[in-house]
Amino acid sequence: MVEKTIELTGTSTSSIEEAVNVAIGRAAVTIQNLRRFRVKEIRGVVENGVVAQWHVTIDLSFVVTERVHE
Protein backbone atom coordinates (compact mmCIF):
# COMPACT_ATOMS: atom_id res chain seq x y z
CA MET A 1 0.00 0.00 0.00
CA VAL A 2 1.15 3.53 -0.78
CA GLU A 3 -0.19 6.68 0.84
CA LYS A 4 0.16 10.25 -0.35
CA THR A 5 -0.06 13.22 2.02
CA ILE A 6 -1.22 16.69 1.07
CA GLU A 7 -1.45 19.91 3.07
CA LEU A 8 -4.78 21.73 3.31
CA THR A 9 -6.15 24.67 5.28
CA GLY A 10 -9.80 24.86 6.35
CA THR A 11 -11.52 27.94 7.70
CA SER A 12 -14.53 28.30 10.00
CA THR A 13 -16.25 31.05 11.92
CA SER A 14 -17.51 28.48 14.46
CA SER A 15 -14.78 26.11 15.65
CA ILE A 16 -11.50 24.33 15.08
CA GLU A 17 -13.35 21.06 14.48
CA GLU A 18 -15.51 22.64 11.79
CA ALA A 19 -12.42 24.09 10.08
CA VAL A 20 -10.92 20.57 9.94
CA ASN A 21 -14.18 19.18 8.56
CA VAL A 22 -14.31 21.92 5.91
CA ALA A 23 -10.85 20.93 4.64
CA ILE A 24 -11.56 17.19 4.69
CA GLY A 25 -15.03 17.60 3.20
CA ARG A 26 -13.70 19.59 0.26
CA ALA A 27 -10.93 17.05 -0.36
CA ALA A 28 -13.46 14.20 -0.28
CA VAL A 29 -15.19 15.69 -3.34
CA THR A 30 -12.24 14.83 -5.59
CA ILE A 31 -10.02 12.43 -3.64
CA GLN A 32 -10.92 8.85 -2.79
CA ASN A 33 -9.60 6.61 -0.01
CA LEU A 34 -9.02 9.34 2.57
CA ARG A 35 -7.30 7.71 5.51
CA ARG A 36 -5.95 9.98 8.25
CA PHE A 37 -5.12 13.57 9.13
CA ARG A 38 -2.79 15.47 11.44
CA VAL A 39 -3.35 19.02 12.63
CA LYS A 40 -0.20 21.00 11.87
CA GLU A 41 -1.20 24.51 12.83
CA ILE A 42 -4.12 26.41 14.33
CA ARG A 43 -4.47 30.13 13.70
CA GLY A 44 -7.25 32.62 14.07
CA VAL A 45 -8.51 36.07 13.22
CA VAL A 46 -9.62 38.46 15.95
CA GLU A 47 -12.21 41.15 15.26
CA ASN A 48 -13.54 43.52 17.92
CA GLY A 49 -11.84 41.53 20.67
CA VAL A 50 -13.34 38.13 19.81
CA VAL A 51 -12.36 35.21 17.59
CA ALA A 52 -13.92 35.79 14.17
CA GLN A 53 -12.34 32.91 12.23
CA TRP A 54 -10.40 29.71 12.83
CA HIS A 55 -7.78 28.60 10.28
CA VAL A 56 -6.54 25.01 10.66
CA THR A 57 -3.76 23.55 8.52
CA ILE A 58 -3.73 19.76 8.27
CA ASP A 59 -1.78 17.01 6.57
CA LEU A 60 -4.31 14.69 4.93
CA SER A 61 -3.31 11.22 3.74
CA PHE A 62 -5.02 8.97 1.24
CA VAL A 63 -4.29 5.58 -0.30
CA VAL A 64 -2.93 5.62 -3.83
CA THR A 65 -4.66 2.87 -5.78
CA GLU A 66 -3.14 0.91 -8.60
CA ARG A 67 -4.88 1.07 -11.93
CA VAL A 68 -4.28 -1.31 -14.78
CA HIS A 69 -4.30 0.43 -18.15
CA GLU A 70 -6.55 -1.24 -20.67
Image: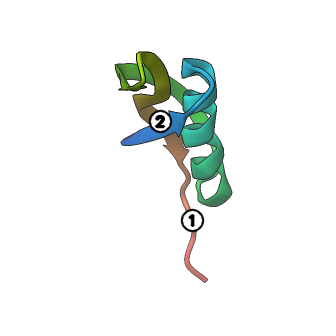
Name the residue that disc number 2 marks: 61
Q: Quadrant of the C terminus?
A: bottom right
Characterize the local packing of mark 2: few (<14), some (14-19) or many (20 or more) Cα atoms within 10 angstroms: some
Asked whether 43 or 28 is in front, the reply is: 43
Q: What's the residue type where badge 1 is placed?
A: Arg
Q: Where's residue 27, x and y in %?
A: 57, 49
Answer whether labels 2 and 1 touch (C-beta < 8 Å). no
Q: Quadrant of residue 17?
A: top right
Q: Nearer the viewer, residue 9 or 38?
A: 9
* Coloring applied to the structure: rainbow
Task: Name the residue carrying label 1.
Answer: 67
The residue lying at 54 percent from left, 57 percent from top is 66
Asked whether 4 or 38 is in front, the reply is 38
Where is residue 25 drawn, in percent x and y?
Answer: 65, 43
Q: Nearer the viewer, residue 20 or 55?
A: 55
Q: Is residue 2 visible?
A: no
**Could you tell me if residue 7 is visible in this image?**
yes
The mark nearer the N terminus, 2 or 1, is 2
Residue extending furthest toward the bottom: 70
Task: Report the side of 10 relative to 24 (left or right).
Answer: left
Q: Amino acid at mark 2?
A: Ser
Q: Residue at x 47, y 17 (%)?
A: 50
Residue at x 57% of width, y 65% of height: 67
Q: Secondary structure at mark 2?
A: strand
